[in-house]
Amino acid sequence: MKITKNNQSAIDYLFQALPQFQSIHKNTTQGVDDSTANILYSLWRTSENKQSNTVYKKPVTMSWYDVKKLEAQGVVKRIQDNIEITDKGQKVLRVLILGNNNSIFDKDNIINYSTALSQITQKKQASKKIASQTKQNWWDKLPKK
């Protein structure tokens, strides 16, 4: 007996009709789990393995299982013994760095990706609210005739 999934939403129907949209949906930064983000962050912090801005030599402490996990999430590409951080991986690192209240230079700095992502979105919402308030205040400061 074969069980098939029925489409449950308009997005499911869209993915079925236009399969090229599935790859766009998979490339969002929200599709990264915390352990993958921590592996990527530890790779980024090891400056002795850095070969260029986005290319790192695979550290001896990193297993090939971790590399495959990073590749499956789409945050790195493996080039022989080197690892290249993709655009999605750079976005994940940006969220980890900007969403963390601690210094990135702390040795025991453990960052939770989902927490950092929620802090970033809260900061964006707060800045939009402040920007909207300053626009209203600016408008009110104009001389009225």
Image: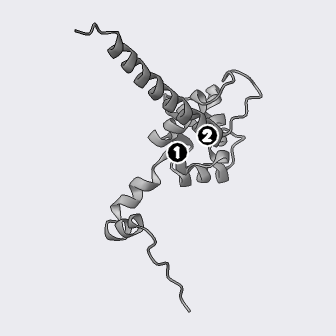
Where does the image place residue 116, in percent across and percent down from the top left?
A: 62, 35
Q: Which residue is mark 1?
A: 75
Callout 2, which amino acid? Leu
122, 39: nearer the viewer:
122
Q: Determine crowd level at label 1: few under 14, some 14-19, many 20+ residues with C-alpha closer than 10 A.
A: many
Up-down relation of residue 93 to residue 11 (above or below): above
| Residue lying furthest front | 145
Q: Residue at x 66, y 24 (%)?
A: 104
Q: Which residue is mark 2?
A: 40
Q: Earlier in the sequence, mark 1 or mark 2?
A: 2
C-beta proximity under 8 Å, tags 1 and 2:
yes
44, 7: nearer the viewer:
7
Callout 1, which amino acid? Val
Q: Is residue 71 visible?
A: yes
| Mark count | 2
Work out how far the residue at label 1 is from the one at label 2, CA to CA, in angstroms: 8 Å
Where does the image place residue 75, in percent across and percent down from the top left?
A: 52, 45
Where does the image place residue 143, in percent across and percent down from the top left?
A: 28, 7
